[in-house]
Image: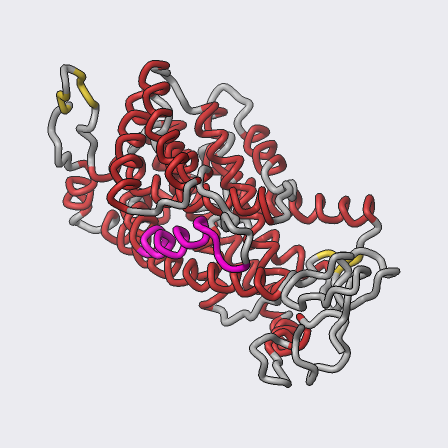
Amino acid sequence: MSPTDPSGTPADPREPDPAGVGDHGPDAKPRLFSRGSFLESSRIAEVLRAETTGGLLLIVGAAIAIIWANTAFSGTYESIRDFKPISEPVSLLGVSLHLDLSLGKWAADGLLAIFFFVVGLELKREFVAGDLRDPGGMVAPALIYVAWNLGSNGGLSGWAIPTATDIAFAVAILAVISTHLPSGLRTFLLTLAVVDDLLAITIIAVFYTEELDLLFLALGLVPIAIFALLVQKRISSGFLLLPLALVAWVLVHESGVHATVAGVLLGFTVPVLRRDDAEGPGLAEHLEHLVRPISAGVAVPIFAFFAAGVTVGGFSGLVESLKDPVALGIVTGLLVGKTVGITGSTWLLSKFTKAELDDELAWIDVIGMAMLAGIGFTVSLLIGELAFGASSERDEHVKVGVLVGSLLAAGLASAILRTRNRVYRRITEEEERDSDLDGIPDVFQTGDQDPSTPPA
């Protein structure tokens, strides 16, 4: 028979164990990285599949840019990146709008607003229905960067560069090395990225706004409020929402706040739950399904193409770039800071809560995931441009630091996680086994010891 709650109502095996202890019983210690509900695990798997495709495209775009920028045709690449489709400010109703941006700036300010809209949707879902908490992976990288840049030749304005995690790049690396992460570790990786994105957009809005026009900012809140009113009424017509989003982007851009903030604010207004409280995806999940492929497959790879092209100047140029404390701070922040920060905060969490790692997982898995989180690409490059100015000498060193740090983190994480792949494969096979062919894997039918019993 299916399990029941104290009221006698049959429990739904699709939902997480209310005690939060999985299959270990109500008297067991709390578990770290235990699997969630079937619906949540399925959603995260779908998200990571989309991000894997986007991550592979991101790597291809960045590789093309790096190779092109280090050939005899580098001038052509720079000309394309710096080309301005609109050569001068646009005058509208007597107001001058500074839309005379280069293609590189359009990618950073415009296309990344789509990426941050998806981030806003994910953040809203985590606040409403998830388990959002800071794993401590941002403080340590920032402190290490600051330690490198305290001298007169330092660049303290770039302190936030090594704090970001690129989820698309990370899962693409997992796909390349054919690693089958259990659902608990997949959830952990996605949560890391969501927390980092939340703090990154806060940092961008607060610390990298040089001039603020309060009138334009107030005007920008008007279309965002109308957008919020429509989505709260579950109106999802693109003919209504897209023009409002475009107007909000323009006004926020003119206010001096980075325009990607508009994307997060718009995404955060979308309701997660259905209006009738019925089961099934809400409007946030519906819009995420529509927009995430555009974000992961188009917006981020194009940004990577325009942002990653750095003329290294051979091995000697690489060594010279890495002498800059900015680049050194980024490399060590991503590689050492992320590993120490995430692993250390997770260890402290286990000590304070007396929680244990889930069955068959070990601390080497946490270290591997922490190193994987050291892949900071998209948001790191964006913050570097904001901190030092696009295409400046320091920005070029930022690109070298981000590329070297991310590649080292990817290589070391891959080496660690590959050694555990046999364990991961066994756990994954268990999580996918469906003996009664009811569409729900047996491990998610909590409390029911007989997998042949149909779910409630």
Q: What residue range appears in magenta? A: 279-297
In the rendered image, residue 142, in percent from the top left (x then y), is placed at 57, 33
Residue in front for this viewpoint, 366 or 49: 49
Coloring scheme used = secondary structure
State whether residue 272 is above or below residue 54.
above
Magenta segment, principal secondary structure?
Answer: helix
Residue at (36, 16) in percent of width and height: 211
In the picture provided, is 184 more to the left or to the right than 204? right
Is residue 74 on the magenta stretch?
A: no
In the rendered image, residue 294, in percent from the top left (x then y), is placed at 32, 53
Quadrant location, the C terminus: bottom right
Residue at (40, 21) in percent of width and height: 209
In the picture provided, is 399 more to the left or to the right than 368? left
Residue at (54, 65) in percent of width and height: 42
In the picture provided, is 253 more to the left or to the right than 153? left
Q: Quadrant of residue 75?
A: top left
In the rendered image, residue 297, in percent from the top left (x then y), is placed at 32, 56
Total marks in image: 0
Residue in front for this viewpoint, 64 or 8: 8
State whether residue 414 is above or below residue 101.
below
In the rendered image, residue 246, in percent from the top left (x then y), is placed at 27, 35
Is residue 282 on the magenta stretch?
A: yes
- For this orientation, the residue located farthest to the right is 27
Quadrant location, the N terminus: bottom right
Residue at (44, 29) in percent of width and height: 204
Q: Quadrant of residue 293?
A: bottom left
- Residue 347 appears in the rendering: yes
- Residue 378 appears in the rendering: no
